[in-house]
Amino acid sequence: MSREQELAENLRVVRERIQAACVAAGRSEDAVTLVAITKTFPISDVRALAALGVRDLGENREQELKVKAPDCQDVTWHFVGQLQSNKARSVVRNASVVHSVDRSSLVKALSHAAVEEGRVLRCLLQVSLAAFGPAEAATGRSRGGVEPDDVPALAAEVAAADGLELGGVMAVAPLGSDADEAFGGLENVASRLRSEHPGADWISAGMSADLDAAIRRGATHVRLGRALLGTRTPLG
Ligand SMILES: *Cc1c(COP(=O)(O)O)cnc(C)c1O
C-alpha cells in the first residue's frame, strides 16, 4: 500500500469513528471538525491529507509550523502547543487559530503581533484539567493550561484585545484520568464561558485515544495525530 492509500484508509476509519460517536451522542454528524495534527510527519503527508480533503491541520511546535504552513496554504492551520511569547509573531503569520492560550503575557504578545500583521487570530483558552488526574493531583504537575477559576478573567482579556477573537476552550485529559469526567469538567467551563461570550463556542478536546469521550462531552474539534498518521518517532 502506498503512503497515500494508507492515509486515505486511516482517514476513512477516523471519519467513521467520529460519525459513530456523534450518532451515539445524539449530535449532528457535522458537529465535529477533525484537526489533523501533523507534528513530526513530513510535508508530503501534509499535502496528501490536504489532497484527501482535510481542511484543518495543526502543529505543536513553532519551528515545524513555520516550515509546513507556507507550503500548504489552502487549509486552516491551528497551533496547539506550548507557546513562548517570543514566537508569537511567527505563529500569527502561519496559523489562524491558537488552541493553547494560557496566560496574560501571551495574550498581549499575540495581540501585538496580530495587529502588526493585520490579521485576526482565533484564540482558545487551554484549560487545566489537573483536578481530574491522579498523577497531577499528587505531584502538582499538570499538562498546562489556565485553572478553571481563572478562565473568566483571561477570557475577558482576549475578548478585549485588538486582533484577537475569543473562540472557546481547549484541553488535554490528564494521564490516568477518566476521560468522560475530565471532559465533563471542560464542558462545564465551556458552558459558563459561552454564557458570557456567546461566540466562544468551540471545544477542542479529544485525541486519538479519547475522541469518543470528548465527543460525548461536546467537543467541536478533535485533534488527531496517531490515528491518522501512525506512530510518531519522538523529536529530540
Ligand atoms: C500531538 C497532539 C495531539 C494529537 O495526539 P495523538 O495522540 O497523536 O492523536 C493533540 N493535541 C496536542 C496538543 C498534541 O500535542
Image: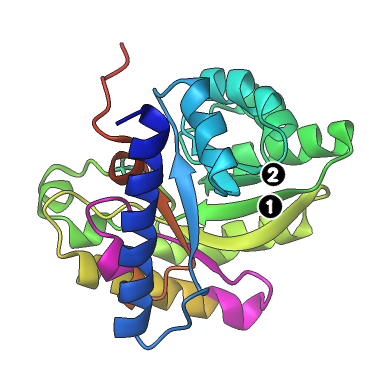
Residue drawn where x is 31% and y is 74% of the image: 21
Q: Which residue is mark 1?
A: 122
| Amino acid type at image mark 2 | Ser
Q: Could you tell whether 174 is left or right of 84 in the image?
A: left
**Furthest-top residue in view?**
236
Residue 90, picture quadrant: top right
Q: Which residue is mark 2?
A: 96
Q: Could you tell whether 173 is left or right of 2 in the image?
A: left
Quadrant (top left/top right/bottom left/bottom right) for the N terminus: top left
**Furthest-front residue in view?**
1
Secondary element at image label 1:
strand
Q: Nearer the viewer, residue 58 or 133?
A: 58
Packing grade of label 2 (10 A; few <14, some 14-19, many >=20) is some
Q: Kindly indicate whether the residue at mark 2 contacts the one at mark 1 (C-beta within 8 angstroms).
A: yes
Residue drawn where x is 41% and y is 75% of the image: 218
Q: Is residue 206 visible?
A: no
| Amino acid type at image mark 1 | Arg
Q: Nearer the viewer, residue 204 or 156?
A: 204
Residue 212 covered by magenta stretch = yes
Q: Is residue 170 visible?
A: yes
Q: Nearer the viewer, residue 42 or 106?
A: 42
Q: Quadrant of ligand 1?
A: top left
Stretch of the chain drawn in magenta? 193-214
* Mark with earlier residue (1, 2): 2
